[in-house]
Amino acid sequence: VFMYLFSSSLFAKENLNRMSERQLNLYDRLINEPSNDWDIYYWATEAKPTPAVFENDVMAMLKEFVKNKNREQRLQQPDLEYLFESPR
């Protein structure tokens, strides 16, 4: 779960500022509704099928991010300053 949470914070830093309001709502629902972070981890890594209710463009973005096709070194969590940046 740690690696998912770690990836999730990096995903948030890279994507929250460019998400639409609809996507932000979908992301909020994704990270808050499932009662078990392991479920999100399995869905994001495609180890288990994603339930239809969470199968959307935000989940697709997260799945692509987790694949790390550019083989970026993701060795530390980002600073949280991005949470305090001015909205678009």
Image (cartoon, rainbow, N blue to C red):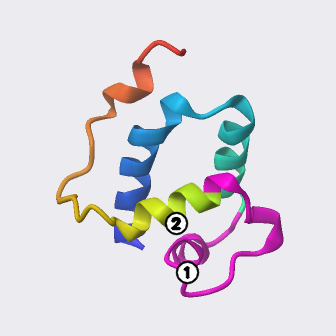
Q: Tell me residue 34's x, y (percent).
A: 69, 66
Mark 1 highlights which residue? 46
Do the CB atoms of the residues marked 1 and 2 lie less than 8 Å apart?
yes
Identify the residue shown where x is 72% and y is 51%.
29
Q: Position of residue 53 (x, y in %)?
A: 82, 65
Which residue is at the front of the view, 44 or 29?
A: 44
Specify whether residue 1 is painted magenta.
no
Q: Is residue 71 left or right of residue 23?
A: left
The residue most toward the bottom is 47
The residue shown at (22%, 58%) is 74
Residue nearer the viewer, 68 or 12: 68
**Secondary structure state at the residue bearing disc 1:** loop
Residue located 26% across and 36% down the image: 79
Number of other residues with Cα within 10 Å of mark 2, as a class: few under 14, some 14 to 19, many 20 or more: some
Residue 21 visible? The answer is yes
Name the mark on residue 17: none
Question: Which of the 4 image quadrants contains residue 19?
Answer: top right
Q: Is residue 53 magenta?
A: yes
Label 1 – label 2 distance at C-alpha: 7 Å
The segment highlighted magenta reads 34-58
